[in-house]
Amino acid sequence: MHKVEDAEQALSYISPCGSEAARKKLGSYYTPADVSLFFWAEFLALNGLEDSKHIADFWGRHHFIEPSAGAGALVLALLKKGGELGLSLHQLAATELTIIDINQAALDFVQEQLSWLEKRWSIFFSNIRYVCSDFLDCTLPISPRVPLFFGNPPFVTNPRGSDWKNLFADFLDRSLRQSGPEGLCHFILPVSIAFSRDYARLREKIRETGKSVAISSFDNIPDTLFPSGKPKHTNTNKANSQRCSILTVFPENTPRVLATRMHRWSKNERQKLLSSPPRYHDVTDCGLNEQFLRPENELIIHYLNNSRNDPRFHTLLSDKGPYSLFVASVARNFIGFRECSSSSVHHLRFDTEKAAYSALLILSSDLFLDYWRSVGDGFHVTKTNIMEFPLHSKLMKLIGTKTSKGKGMWEKRMDFAKTKRHPGGMTVSYDFSPSALSLLGRRSHCLAGNGCRASL
């Protein structure tokens, strides 16, 4: 597995000059060994494959298809997990597997590794095929077994006018079409698959399969699934710039949508994260059909379920109101507020001072932060994120009694100032979270008291 990981990184730079530009053009992000093993552990757990009897039946019924194999990290991890769950060498040798890659050098390397295993184990992989081709153009072999597509497809921007903005979506689209009524798909994808308008139609295609969907999502700070991200990039932030989701589409009698929060972890927590099953929430009926929610917690799901028919935040606004609030367009651990308008803020206008302070209380609260983390990309605070926040009637009743607190926070804003230097100067943002309303009841000064969880 570690030899394959090294080869995967090398294959990210297969052009003669080994340039970052060439790597980006190919969309190569190598798959680390720990992620590869987690990838299959998660899949097997979702499908209830936890003992040798069930795994043997599943293994024998499915045709595994890897459309962009790279150095074979996911292929090797598949065999390793099968062995760990009790498959015999004979059963592993009978694995039906089609390995596809546009790069012949990658296929040769994978074949070398599997040949080494054949010698080591004294077996012969009789049902493995190697196809050097673009997955989108190749003819897939006919098999009586149920297709199971898996992989880490290339993340690369498509030419203007293509069906999808990014090539990974073409790989997923074809896999969905080829999987039929019983087939499965299991892919590492950019997190944009969960919420971007560019892939709204693709999410609809996923739902139209009538299958269950599970999506686990991973942030990129402080650690990231791909530790080297863009290995030869000198900018630390850009070197870790890929947020990912592992998407699984699988048949169930009653289709569900399961989702995790957007995982965030430090490097010293990586081993624990990738050796533990993710916690899925059932978000089938949360009412956000335009995306796959990444719920920060159960409280957000509860809030969304109970406010789906309530007015949205935009009803507080006025096109030309005399009172303003300037909300930073990026966030991390708090929603920032600024002193004046600029290209990096959302300028919100209100007809009354009370409406402006009510908005400040809402947007600085733990409720809105967790909502944003559940529907946003983990970095940008979009106008839609703000405008579509639901205003539950009980929330508005509570906020209506606390506008003086919002006024006091703003008058003492310098106590909450945070500065950040950049080439153009220095930006001052106000982080009101230490004094903001705790609407989810996670802090001792929750204004709704012990009943705030139930009330909101």
Image: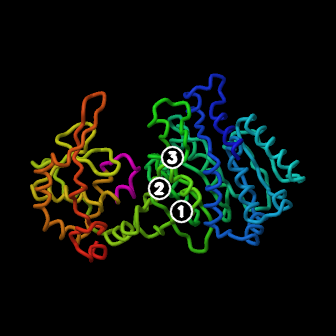
Decide if residue 332 is on the left or right side of residue 359. right
Q: Mark 2 points at which residue?
A: 263
Q: Which residue is drawn at 63% across and 31% down?
A: 13
On residue 260, which mark appears?
A: none
The CA distance from mark 3 to mark 1 is: 16 Å
Q: Which of marks 3 and 1 is nearer the N terminus?
A: 3
Magenta stretch, residue numbers: 371-383
Decide if residue 237 is on the left or right side of residue 396. right
Q: Mark 1 points at which residue?
A: 278
Q: In which quarter of the image is residue 85?
A: bottom right
Amino acid bearing label 3:
Thr
CB within 8 Å, label 3 to label 1: no
- Residue 271: percent from left, percent from top: 57, 54
In magenta segment, residue 377: yes
Q: Name the residue under label 3.
A: 224
The residue sitting at the front extreme is: 268
CB within 8 Å, label 2 to label 1: yes
